[in-house]
Amino acid sequence: MPELPQLLLFIAAGWLLNLTPGPDVLCIVNHALRGGVRPGVVAALGIVSGCFVHVVAAAVGVSALLATSATAFTVLKWVGAAYLVFMGVRLLRSRPSPLAVAPALAVPSLWRVYQRGFLTNVLNPKVALFFLAFVPQFIPPDAPHKAWTFLVLGLIFNLNSLPINLGYAWLAAWAARRLDAVQKAMHWLDGLAGLMFLGFGLRLAMTDHPAS
């Protein structure tokens, strides 16, 4: 394990990175605005679960394969881009619907919300490459078990992301309950979210392999 100052730096850097808006944050906020706290929290848990997949994959070398194999990177890149574009189109085609009085009724299936959060994260190869590039910087060169150290740091990173992701869910749900303007603009927010998802998908599709 790294020394305490390095570990604290790792935690602080993780918080800052998780505060940065991206597809994960957008997924959480959109579900919390439409359905309340529970869907937002479930989406956040799905995203954190997807992060664990990337951490384990990086620890066993799959992320290294993505970094060195243009074919593997391209396959996962296009799958992830297609999913983000699909989410964007789905949001753009959604009908205007004000928030329900009972937040849980606004989302037909929390399991589907969890799946969307999970897939939004796990199908993004840039997350896998991020873990491969970021976490090893905090592993001491003389660490006897680097794979286990990687897993522990990945666990810390994901657990630290929970307060940020849950905070986004609570904040969005709070705004949706208390701001009439937010409720009246839900359809426009869906359209904006759809355009952003399309943008994320297209940007991911145009991402070159790091080795190229």
Image (cartoon, helix red, strand yellow):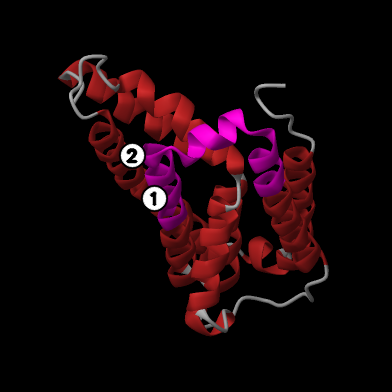
Highlighted magenta segment, given as a residue range: 48-77
Q: In screen coordinates, is 146 left or right of 163?
A: left
- Residue 147 vertical position relative to residue 180 in the rendered view, above or below: above
Q: In screen coordinates, is 27 left or right of 203?
A: left
Q: Residue at x 34, y 48 (%)?
A: 163
Q: In screen coordinates, is 28 left or right of 191?
A: left
Position in image of residue 36 (x %, y %): 50, 70
Residue type, numbered disc 1: Phe
Where is mark 1, residue-wise? 52
Q: Residue at x 24, y 24 (%)?
A: 7
Q: In this orientation, does residue 26 appear?
A: yes
| Front residue (pair 19, 134) | 134
Q: In screen coordinates, is 30 left or right of 104?
A: right
Position in image of residue 117 (x %, y %): 53, 61
Position in image of residue 115 (x %, y %): 53, 68
Where is mark 2, residue-wise? 154
